[in-house]
Amino acid sequence: MATYDVSDRSAIVTGAGSGIGRAVATLLAANGAAVVVSDLDATAADAVTAEITAAGGRATALVGDVSDPEVVDRLVAAAEELAPLRIAVNNAGIGGPAVPVGDYPLDAWRRVIEVDLNAVFYALRAQVPAMAAHGGGAIVTMASVLGSVGIAHSSAYVTAKHALVGLTKTAALEYGAQGVRVTAVGPGFISTPLLEANLDAATQQALADKHATGRLGTSEEVAALVAFLVSDAATFVTGSYHLVDGGYAAQ
Ligand code: NAP
């Protein structure tokens, strides 16, 4: 398997205690990055940090809510202590309740938009200047295939993920000349704790059937795309939105 060397730099991975973020953090560390493992859950963040260290990599855990701009600033400072910050994967996200628009609770709507969209904006504001000061870097926003198509009963999530694609394109246009690349990744339905906690087995199977592959994806399959996008193999890739969706959006 190809590896994309990212040594001599640090990487922030949010939501790195579980699922896709965990797979991204461990792969970037294996590829040489010093990783800030960011999560709400201290036990999970510590476990991933220990896993990376045991494998010979460098990592530090930072616990906090990425919808708090001060936490985002602390993530940048923690990364800079390890090595120049040149990678960020803004991955933390939540699903929200499964209800139609007319029944969607206002507090739940606000929370999903805050975590899935506003937190990524706060992150970009903090990360871009630090990367520009080092001559550049690469930022991935974790959108979803639901950044390009809708799905019933998930309006806040779909809205946030569509908006992330626009935010990604705009930031890429603004900072490309300073060497900062910004791309969005759109996973199909991936077997992770987020998915398993929200959907019963029958619903998961029905979703699997909607992918050309006939199955759900794995976190490692998403991490492989991210590892390419943040590496120096992708220096002409920016402002773009990359599906890793098993063919979900092909029909
Ligand atoms: P996951 O297994 O639930 O992992 C997400 C991690 O983010 C959890 O450890 C969670 O901590 C953490 N987190 C949540 N809110 C946070 C906050 N405000 N601040 C810091 N950390 C926070 O989810 P996943 O399936 O890997 O999803 C990761 C990303 O991929 C999300 O943005 C999701 O929308 C996106 N995605 C997932 C799928 C899929 O099918 N799984 C498909 C497309 C896109 P707690 O566990 O403590 O809440």
Image (cartoon, grey):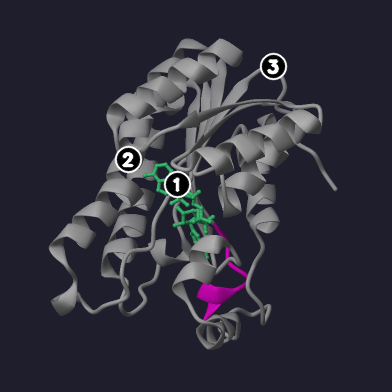
The image quarter in which residue 191 lies: bottom right
Say above or below: 43 vs 97: above
The local secondary structure at tag 2 comes to: helix
Amino acid at the residue labelled 2: Ala
- Furthest toward the right, the residue is 1
> At 68% from the left edge and 26% from the top edge, which residue is drawn?
33
The image quarter in which residue 230 lies: top right
Q: Is residue 121 left or right of residue 194?
A: left
The local secondary structure at tag 3 comes to: loop
The circle drawn on residue 133 is none
Residue holding disc 2 = 119
Mark 3–mark 1 Cα distance, whole angstroms, equals: 25 Å
Q: Which one is in front in this view, the residue at disc 3 or the one at disc 1?
A: 1
Residue holding disc 1 = 92
Asked if marks 1 and 2 touch (Cβ < 8 Å), the reply is yes
Which residues lie in the magenta part? 243-251
> At 71% from the left edge and 40% from the top edge, which residue is drawn?
27
- Horizontal and vertical percent position of residue 183: 49, 43
Q: Is residue 72 visible?
A: yes
> At 67% from the left edge and 62% from the top edge, which residue is drawn?
218
Ligand 1 under 8 Å from disc 2 Cβ: yes
- Horizontal and vertical percent position of residue 118: 27, 43
The magenta stretch spans residue 246: yes
Mark 1–mark 2 Cα distance, whole angstroms, equals: 9 Å
